[in-house]
Amino acid sequence: MNLFKKKNYIILDRRSEAPMPAPAEHEAPAVPDGMWVKCSHCKKLVYKKEMEPYSICPKCGGHFRLGAMERIAITCDENTFSELNGTMQAKNPMGYPNYDKIIAKAQQKSGILDGVVTGTCQIGGVDTVLAVMDGNFMMGSMGSVVGEKITRAIEYATSHSLPIVIFTVSGGARMQEGIISLMQMAKTSAALNRHAEAGLFYLSVITDPTTGGVSASFASLGDVILAEPGALMGFAGQRVIEGTINEKLPPGFQRAEFQLEHGFVDAIVPRPQLKDTIARLLALHTHKGGGF
Amino acid sequence: MNKAAEVLAASRKITRPTTLELIAAIFDDFIELHGDRHFADDGAIVGGIATLNGNPVTVVGVQKGHTTEENIRRNFGSPNPEGYRKQMRLMKQAEKFHRPVITFINTSGAYCGIGAEERGQGEAIARCLFETAGLKTPVISIFIGEGGSGGALALACGDKVWMLQNGMYAVLSPEGFASILWRSPARAAEAAELMKITAPDLLKNGVIEKIIPEPKEGLDHNLAYTASILKEELVKELHTLCQMDIEELLQKRYERFRKFGEFSE
């Protein structure tokens, strides 16, 4: 019986080993690239295939954050999205040190040129203008490019008598562009005023998180405001409030459910039902009426 | 201390004249009106009707105090949502009765608290930006001290935006800027300089149209000096704005804010 016989082995001199790779490269569990992700809501490890196509955790139902292109893919009717102003890029109005490098890094990380993608499309067969912010680009902060693209999208909708749907995700005004960022709030809100004066429909969809200057401008101005489950929406950041009042905030504070309770959103719609809900609302608002 | 940090300190000086003192120095027959008709009367926002050279106007502004006690009543000049809704109520009232509106801005920002969020601070500010853009009467906005963030912008969407010599206006406080971007609130003076918060800087980039001079001895020692200049400028400007066709006025106001943004394509 050779079965239990000790195998031959060799002893390695530690000094002869190849140098260890830098620890950072080995921190992630050794599973094939990107097949598993940790849910940011329930902290459990989730098989990525099980989250498709809506990026929802199969264990807790938590909604993962989506990039603009992923959002467009699950929202627009197939092959109907046509981008507007797709080449716009940031300059440096305040002369912020290394802003060009910060922008280049964000572009590389997000795969888009700035924090919003805008265009025209059909949703449920209805023509609409669509703007989708992207949290992967400097946390969706609003500087000149975001403000200008959203304003042009609204103006396009006004001049073509179209509704507009805006998906928001933003940490607020982009501080690196200083006061010019703040002006984007006034600019987008004024454009929405004209869209409203023309009797056109604006649907705002709040996704996690929507705060600061975006919550205090176009995000809060929808004729109808929908929110994804659990999405954070508020003017002041939670740490700022805790610092001001010197106490911990209650659980669920500023979440979509809190905003529904306090009357600031019309409905919370889980992602799998979102496209259908948007399509129905668009259809109701493009109906010419007069049937009575 | 650099120039921007000096201006910042001057704009926050506790003896700096407040909105109510400026109203008393410039207008006649002021009647203060209270409440937003929804929830409460916010002490941080004051407003009402007055006359300027005999003509009725609506005035509204952020009120700070000169003592801690006064400041507690005024919430240190940080409005709650009911303050912004009171502002909007008075501005819609002005529109109805064809009165021009003058706003005075002096706030480090909208209040950050639980109640403010429960009552929709973001929505309250957004509504001011949206409604002012379409308000069918002339609006002149004047920064008299601090101007911080969206909480200041809510009152600063006028046809003309002016600033007293030692006023300031920024996307957020230089302390906040330094602590968020550099994790070092101690670098506030450096941030103030970089952020271009002073009246001459803001005039250069078109954020304001006019600087109202302050006396050498300080605004708190000679308010009459600045008040008389401001009164004269207001009368002159309102004469022009009130002659304008409403559609033209609104178009110009739209273009005033439409122009901001630097980008390439």
Image: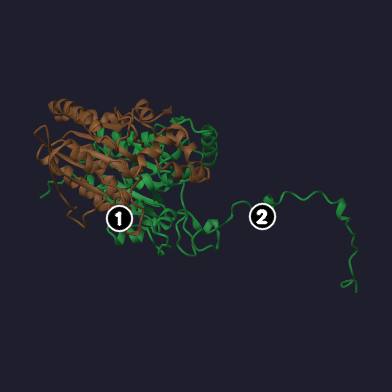
Chain colours: A green, B brown
Q: What subunit carries mark 2?
A: A
Callout 1 touching callout 2 (CB < 8 Å): no
Question: Which residue is found at the position 67% from the left and 56% from the top?
Answer: A30
What kind of residue is marked 2? Answer: Glu
Q: Position of residue A278 (x, y in %)?
A: 31, 50
- Position of B208 with respect to A291 (left or right) is right
Question: Which residue is found at the position 47% from the left and 55% from the top?
Answer: A64
Query: How many marks overall?
Result: 2
Is residue A87 visible to us here? no
Tell me the crowding category of disc 2: few under 14, some 14 to 19, or many 20 or more residues within 10 angstroms, Cα based. few
Disc 2 target residue: A27
Question: Which residue is found at the position 25% from the left and 50% from the top?
Answer: B83
Q: Closest to the observer: A123 or A184?
A: A184
Q: Is residue B89 above or below residue A112?
A: below
Q: Closest to the observer: A14 or B57?
A: B57
Q: Position of residue A266 (x, y in %)?
A: 28, 56
The CA span between labels 1 and 2 is 55 Å
Q: Position of residue B235 (x, y in %)?
A: 16, 28
The numbered dot on residue A231 is: none
Quadrant that contains the N terminus of chain A: bottom right
Of helix, strand and loop, which one carries label 2? loop
What kind of residue is marked 1? Answer: Glu
Q: Quadrant of residue B126?
A: top left
Q: Position of residue A200 (x, y in %)?
A: 23, 41
Disc 1 target residue: B69
Of helix, strand and loop, which one carries label 1? helix
Tell me the crowding category of disc 1: few under 14, some 14 to 19, or many 20 or more residues within 10 angstroms, Cα based. few
Please tell me if label 1 and label 2 are on a single chain.
Answer: no
